[in-house]
Amino acid sequence: MSSSLLAVVNEVRTNKGQPSVEALASSLRWREDLGFESLDLAELTVRIEEKFGVDVFADGIVTTVGEVVRKIEKAGRT
């Protein structure tokens, strides 16, 4: 799992007053496991697009970390 993606996730979590996570698993769900709400997902999308040049939500909703990782990898941006 990309340490760059972990850094982006922790930036968003820190901005909402949540503690950082040590690691990301592909099966983690954005809302249920990481506590992201709609605005958090919007911030995450912007930060991922800035960092990796990929709009992970362009093809629809993604619900897990693994889905985002696959889109970043598919774009060759890891």
Image (spheres, rainbow, N blue to C red):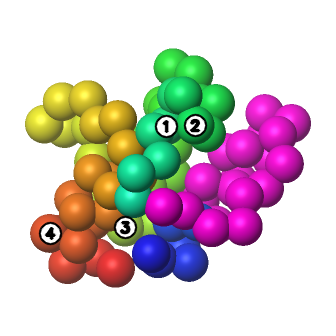
Q: Would you name the residue on which mark 3 appears?
A: 52
The CA span between labels 3 and 4 is 11 Å
CA–CA distance in space, label 2 to label 1: 6 Å
Q: Which of the marked residues, 3 or 4, is nearer the chain's N terminus?
A: 3
Front disc: 3 or 4: 4
The residue that disc 1 covers is 30
Is disc 4 surrounded by few (<14), some (14 to 19) or many (20+) residues within 10 Å? few
Q: Is residue 35 above or below residue 69?
A: above
Query: CB atoms at circles 2 and 1 under 8 Å apart?
Result: yes
Per the image, label 3 sits on a secondary structure element best described as helix
Quadrant of residue 71 within the rendered picture? bottom left
Query: Nearer the N terminus, badge 2 or badge 3?
Result: 2
Q: Quadrant of the C terminus?
A: bottom left
Kindly identify the amino acid type of the residue bearing the numbered disc 4: Lys
Instruction: Tell which circle, 1 or 3, labels the residue nearer the N-terminal end.
Output: 1
Helix, strand or loop status at disc 1: loop
| Crowding at mark 3 (Cα within 10 Å: few <14, some 14-19, many 20+) | some
Identify the residue at image location x=37%, y=67%. 52
| Earlier-in-chain disc, 4 versus 2 | 2
- Tag 1: Cα neighbours inside 10 Å, few (<14), some, or many (≥20)? some
Q: Position of residue 61 (x, y in %)?
A: 26, 29
Residue matched to label 2: 33
Q: Nearer the viewer, mark 1 or mark 3?
A: 1
To which residue does mark 4 refer? 74
The disc labelled 2 sits on which kind of residue?
A: Asp
Question: What amino acid is found at the position of numbered circle 1 in the picture?
Answer: Trp
